[in-house]
Amino acid sequence: MATPCHILVEDNPVIIYASRNGTPEKVTRMLSRFLATFAEERETAGEFTDTPECLAAQIVVRFGFEICEDDFSNLKVGLKFYPDVDYLYFINQQFQISVWLPQDAYRTNPNLGLKGCQPLAATPENR
């Protein structure tokens, strides 16, 4: 099952694209664990500068290993939204995840980003 997705980090322009394994059950579970560790490491180190940049890079490096399953050809980082994604995951400054569903407007014009999407009902991981 392909299930492509985007991962977005607040205050960072990069768009992470994975062409498979993007279901909310899998992504929110993995991202929630990862974000808890990331936040704890930042707090312990007392490092708060460039957090959006560090977070996006760490998602690609650490999270990429889990979602790609040894095939990194399905992971991209850029500034382009893809119309084929089934879900968009947005991580805010408090490291909370919200899940978005692309609507017809997004499919027609993916440059709308989240403005062309509808939020998925809240799950325990993104409350």
Image (cartoon, grey):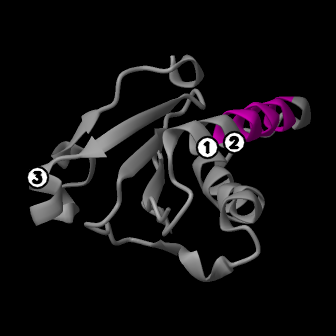
C-alpha span from label 1 to label 2: 6 Å
Queried whether the magenta region covers residue 41, the answer comes back as: yes
Q: Amino acid at mark 2?
A: Met
- Could you tell me how far apart the alpha carbons at marks 3 and 1 are, in whole angstroms? 25 Å
Is 57 or 72 nearer to us in this picture?
A: 72
Looking at the picture, tell me which residue is in the foreground, 49 or 88. 88
Total marks in image: 3
Q: Residue at x 55, y 28 (%)?
A: 96
Q: Which residue is mark 2?
A: 30
Q: Write down the region rendered in magenta.
A: 31-43
Residue 59 in percent (x, y) is at 67, 55
Q: Quadrant of residue 47?
A: top right
Q: Residue at x 52, y 64 (%)?
A: 20
> Along the horizontal axis of the image, is 52 left or right of 113?
right
Is 28 situated above or below 60? above
x and y percent of residue 42 in the render?
80, 37
Kindly identify which residue carries mark 1.
26
Q: Residue furthest right?
A: 44
Residue furthest bottom in the image:
73
Quick one: label 3 or label 1, which is nearer the N terminus?
Answer: 1
Instruction: Tell me where residue 112 sits by quadrant.
Output: bottom left
Please tell me whether residue 28 is drawn above or below residue 81 in the rendered image: above
What's the residue at 54%, 33% (across, down)?
93
Q: Nearer the viewer, mark 1 or mark 2?
A: 1
- Separation of residues labelled 3 and 2 (CA atoms): 28 Å
Which mark is first along the chain, 2 or 3?
2
* Amino acid, disc 3: Asp
* Residue sitting at x 39%, y 48%: 88
Look at mark 3 in the image and give the residue it sits on: 104
Asked if the residues shown at circle 1 and circle 2 are in contact, with their CB atoms under 8 angstroms apart, the answer is yes
Give the image location of residue 17, x and y in percent.
48, 66
